[in-house]
Image: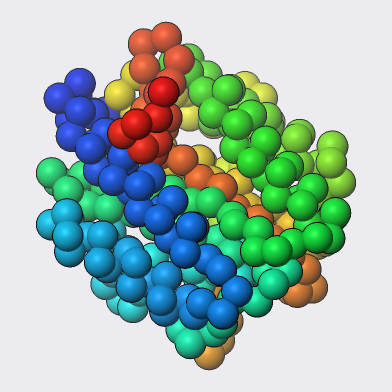
């Protein structure tokens, strides 16, 4: 395992990529309305990247055909933009990154489109809390097992499943770098975080069972085996001298 430690100047460049990733994530999320296809969400991302002269990090990555991953309901991650129409009651995950100045951001949020089911609302709110708990746990000297434990505890205390098959990761020059960042773990185990490390923390939480499979028709999309709803939030975070900084926030973030 080779964990890249970024210099302050490199983090400055990465901050730009991450702020733009956050902006386009929120534009994509705002476009998720009933009757809109996921391909139209992809168009929002392509237009933003073209206008700002940056590259969508995921387009062509490992052969991925979309400018973002857009995953609906039981699709956890790696949904491919298509003619699928968003319907009332859907939850849509817009997972996107921007590449500029040699660096990538990686961020995701779950949008509720006219959702009234209280359990689904609770799932989405809990997943957001899982990400917040993971971020709150981050800092120099902290083990990745501490971060995973913090996320897992929030999810399981609420009665939800934590996806084990897919996890967070380092991010920087490459979309996926070392280390692996699981959303579960034992305190005091795994890698010790150091200033200059940049990681994508991305809890994937399920209403029912946490087991997943990859859709054999497109070899990408990760779906829950029981076809229960899954939620996903993700931020790119830099470890600092006294804690951490969430990089995937818009430029006007307070
Ligand atoms: Mg990621």
Q: Residue furthest top?
A: 242
Rendered view: 179 above or below 138: below
Q: Is the image coloured rainbow, by chain, by secondary structure, or in one colour?
A: rainbow
In the rendering, at what x and y percent does residue 86 appear? 59, 76
Question: Does any portion of residue 3 appear in the rendered image?
Answer: no
Q: Residue at x 84, y 41 (%)?
A: 158
Residue 168 vs residue 27: left or right? right
Residue at the (70%, 64%) spot, across then down:
114
Q: Is residue 217 above or below residue 109?
A: below
Q: Is residue 131 above or below residue 142?
A: below
The image quadrant where one finds the N terminus is top left
Tell how many labels: 0
Percent from the top left, x then y, of residue 13? Answer: 18, 34
Please state if 196 lies on the left or on the right of 103 as rendered: right
Please tell me in which quadrant of the rendered image residue 54 appears: bottom left
Asked whether, in this view, residue 77 is left or right of residue 156, the answer is left
Indicate the position of residue 44 as horizontal and vertical percent values: 34, 67
Could you tell me residue 127's position as x and y percent?
A: 67, 45
The C terminus - image quarter? top left
Position of 229 with respect to 136 (left or right) is right
Q: Nearer the viewer, residue 124 or 251?
A: 251
| Residue 43 visible from this viewpoint | yes
Tell me the residue at 55%/61% (across/down). 93
| Foreground residue among 165 and 66 | 66
Q: Picture quarter containing residue 118?
A: bottom right
Which residue corresponds to the image point at 59% horizontal and 57% vertical from the top-left? 111
Please identify the quarter of the rendering in which residue 52 is found.
bottom left
């Amino acid at each position: 395992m080779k964990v890249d430690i970024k210099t302050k100047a490199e983090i400055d460049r990465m901050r730009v990529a991450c702020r733009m990733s956050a902006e386009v994530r929120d534009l994509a999320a705002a476009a998720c309305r009933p009757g809109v296809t996921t391909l139209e969400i992809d168009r929002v991302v392509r237009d933003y990247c073209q206008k700002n002269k940056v590259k969508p990090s995921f387009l062509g990555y490992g052969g991925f055909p979309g400018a973002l991953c857009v995953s609906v309901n039981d699709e956890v991650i790696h949904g491919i933009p298509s003619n699928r129409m968003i319907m009332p009651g859907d939850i849509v995950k817009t997972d996107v990154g921007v590449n500029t100045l040699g660096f990538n951001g990686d961020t995701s949020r779950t949008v509720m489109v006219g959702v009234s089911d209280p359990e689904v609302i609770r799932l989405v709110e809990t997943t957001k809390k899982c990400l917040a708990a993971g971020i709150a746990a981050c800092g120099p000297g902290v083990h990745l097992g501490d971060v995973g434990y913090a996320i897992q505890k929030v999810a399981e205390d609420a009665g939800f499943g934590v996806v084990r098959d897919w996890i967070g990761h380092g991010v920087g020059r490459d979309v996926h770098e070392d280390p692996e960042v699981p959303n579960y773990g034992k305190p005091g185990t795994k890698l010790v975080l150091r200033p200059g490390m940049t990681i994508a923390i991305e809890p994937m939480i399920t209403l029912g069972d946490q087991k997943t499979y990859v859709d054999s028709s497109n070899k990408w999309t990760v779906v829950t085996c029981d076809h229960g709803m899954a939620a996903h939030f993700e931020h790119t975070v830099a470890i600092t001298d006294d804690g951490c900084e969430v990089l995937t926030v818009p430029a006007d973030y307070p």
